[in-house]
Image (cartoon, helix red, strand yellow):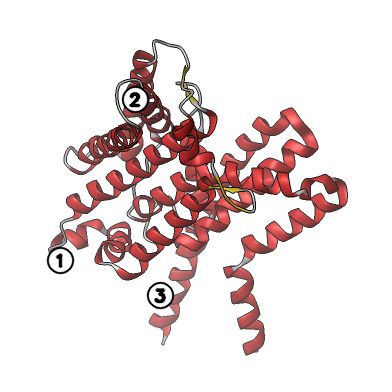
């Protein structure tokens, strides 16, 4: 029946939204204060940091690579921007912080594209390097600032008590969605993730695009780092622990395969919202078991991705067998 097929397609497309609605309904019954306006604003604000990083990594993961050094990028760029405030103006301090993230992304991209280092190994190494650099520049202590203009960069409320940070997240979504949907770079991300060698034979400059995707990811990571430093008026090497893995989890839950080639920006947004809702819900309901929940979530993401790939391979095998029999 056609209507059953359509219903199944809608359920598959919006399954994360359905899960989010169910979780919100459950939480509404158990803890009604969860839906206070202040708490919802806090969820949106806290989600925006990881959301900006996830959106920035979307094209990179679609192309078949990922960056687990993003958490170290975040804390180093935030620390650099705060330290620069001691010597220069706010715009320059922010730009230097952003430039540092782009440079970190460039290093990762060169290691992966030019030296053919696996992205997991390359970014695992740079993660340690960037975190060590943060300990060095901060002298193994948190660095803070009292610059009110810097605080306003992310924390100033724009409308209805919603801070700028949330609007930065929305802007990031629209920008990367437009790149993925309407530009050659976005189309090449899918092609490279599907078959990089075939793209090389077709004349596509795969290495250049892979480096560009790493730079974009690094730039978004540093923007998130500067925004986080602005929000809490401080930076420390320990603030970014596990962020890279949570970002990857959000992207994969949103439908981007770890092997690349498939996914969408709007799917990633759903994954980000789902993790934020689940994270806050578990904090409300079970408190200090939140870390255990995150660990189980990461394990579940990996298993889900593996099972999805196997299911897709079996579907292709069945189609191939059917075509041969015809």
Quadrant location, the C terminus? bottom left
Instruction: Give yes or no for contact between labels 2 and 3 (Cβ–Cβ under 8 Å).
Output: no
Is there any visible trace of residue 262 in the rendered image? no
* Label disc, if present, on residue 185 of the rendered structure: none
In front: label 1 or label 3: 1
Q: Position of residue 99 (x, y in %)?
A: 27, 37
Q: Marks 1/3: CA distance?
A: 26 Å
| Badge 2 element | helix
Which residue in the protein does label 3 denote? 320
Q: Residue at x 37, y 60 (%)?
A: 261
Q: Is residue 207 left or right of residue 18?
A: left
Tell me which corner region of the image, top left, top right, bottom left or bottom right, holds residue 88. top left
Is there any visible trace of residue 132 in the rendered image? yes
Instruction: Give yes or no for contact between labels 1 and 3 (Cβ–Cβ under 8 Å).
Output: no
Q: Earlier in the sequence, mark 2 or mark 1?
A: 2
| Badge 3 element | helix
Location of residue 296 with respect to 211 vertically, above or below: above
In front: label 2 or label 1: 2
Location of residue 238 with respect to 68 vertically, above or below: above
| Badge 1 element | loop
Which residue in the protein does label 1 denote? 202
Location of residue 76 with respect to 10 vertically, above or below: above
Quadrant location, the N terminus? bottom right
Identify which residue, 162 or 311, lies in the foreground. Answer: 162
Q: Position of residue 306 (x, y in %)?
A: 50, 51
In front: label 2 or label 3: 2
Q: Position of residue 66 (x, y in %)?
A: 37, 44
Location of residue 249 with respect to 90 vertically, above or below: below
Q: Residues within 10 Å of mark 3 (few under 14, many from 20)?
A: few
Q: Marks 2/1: CA distance?
A: 36 Å
Which residue in the protein does label 2 denote? 130
């Amino acid at each position: 029946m056609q209507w059953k097929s359509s219903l199944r397609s809608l359920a598959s497309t919006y399954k994360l939204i359905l899960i989010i609605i169910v979780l919100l309904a459950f939480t509404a019954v158990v803890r009604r204060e969860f839906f206070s306006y202040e708490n919802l604003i806090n969820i949106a604000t806290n989600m925006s940091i990881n959301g900006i990083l996830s959106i920035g990594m979307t094209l990179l993961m679609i192309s078949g690579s990922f960056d687990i050094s993003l958490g170290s990028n975040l804390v180093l760029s935030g620390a650099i921007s705060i330290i620069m405030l001691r010597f220069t103006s706010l715009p320059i301090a922010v730009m230097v912080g952003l430039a540092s993230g782009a440079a970190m992304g460039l290093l990762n991209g060169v290691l992966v594209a030019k030296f053919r280092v696996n992205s997991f190994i390359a970014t695992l190494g740079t993660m340690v390097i960037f975190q060590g650099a943060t300990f060095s520049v901060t002298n193994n202590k948190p660095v803070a600032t009292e610059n009110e203009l810097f605080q306003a960069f992310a924390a100033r409320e724009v409308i209805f008590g919603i801070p700028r940070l949330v609007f930065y997240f929305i802007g990031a979504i629209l920008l990367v969605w437009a790149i993925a949907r309407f530009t050659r770079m976005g189309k090449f991300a899918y092609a490279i993730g599907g078959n990089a060698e075939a793209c090389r034979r077709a004349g596509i400059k795969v290495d250049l695009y892979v480096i560009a995707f790493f730079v974009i990811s690094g730039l978004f990571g540093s923007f998130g780092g500067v925004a986080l430093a602005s929000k809490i008026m401080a930076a420390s090497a320990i603030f970014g622990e596990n962020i890279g893995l949570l970002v990857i989890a959000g992207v994969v839950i949103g439908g981007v395969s770890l092997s690349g080639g498939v996914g969408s920006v709007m799917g990633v947004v759903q994954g980000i919202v789902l993790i934020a809702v689940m994270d806050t819900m578990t904090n409300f309901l079970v408190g200090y078991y939140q870390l255990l929940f995150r660990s189980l979530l990461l394990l579940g993401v990996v298993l889900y991705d593996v099972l999805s790939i196997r299911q897709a391979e079996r579907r292709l095998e069945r189609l191939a067998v059917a075509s041969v029999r015809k």
